[in-house]
Amino acid sequence: MRVSFTQHKSKREILDFLCEYIGSGSVHEYQHNNMAEYVIHDQKCITEFLRDIEPFIFVKRRHLQLAQELIILKKKEHYTKESLVKMLELRKKMASLNNYSKKFLSLTP
């Protein structure tokens, strides 16, 4: 699992600050869309970070809850068929929450 944040590359300093403050992850720029992305891969850091920001999350609260469930499942030493299926279901639920309506916005009635 990974956690990522994006900003226009003109505001990259915000992502650099987060990276330095959290002490994990990396920031990359993408020329094709003028965006910068901060990505955290360290699972322990992600667990702590999600716990710390939970009281302040409103819009993506369901994403956060599903991610926390997924982390609990991934901490188990041995995966069962059922746990792998559950992980896949959680991942699909998270993906279904993403809103890409701008891509599908119709300008005609």
Image (cartoon, rainbow, N blue to C red):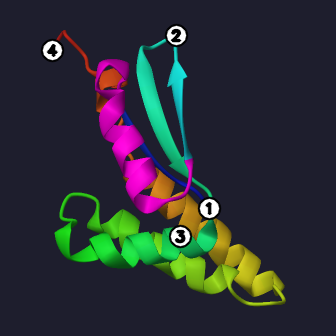
Residue at numbered disc 3 = 45
Label 2, secondary structure: give it.
loop
Dot 1 or dot 4, earlier in sequence: 1
Which label sits on residue 1? 1
Dot 4 or dot 3, earlier in sequence: 3
Q: Which amino acid is tagged 4? A: Pro
Which label sits on residue 46? none
Q: Give me the residue at 20% from left, 76% from top.
A: 55
36 with respect to 54 (left or right): right
Residue at numbered disc 2 = 32
* Foreground disc of the pair 3, 1: 3
Question: Is residue 9 in the magenta section?
Answer: yes
What is the CA distance from the residue labelled 1 to the residue labelled 2? 25 Å
Give percent across and percent down for residue 35: 42, 22
In the image, is residue 87 above or below residue 39? below
* Magenta-highlighted residues: 8-25
What is the CA distance from the residue labelled 2 to the residue labelled 3? 29 Å
Q: Which amino acid is tagged 3? A: Cys
Q: How many marks?
A: 4
Residue at numbered disc 4 = 109
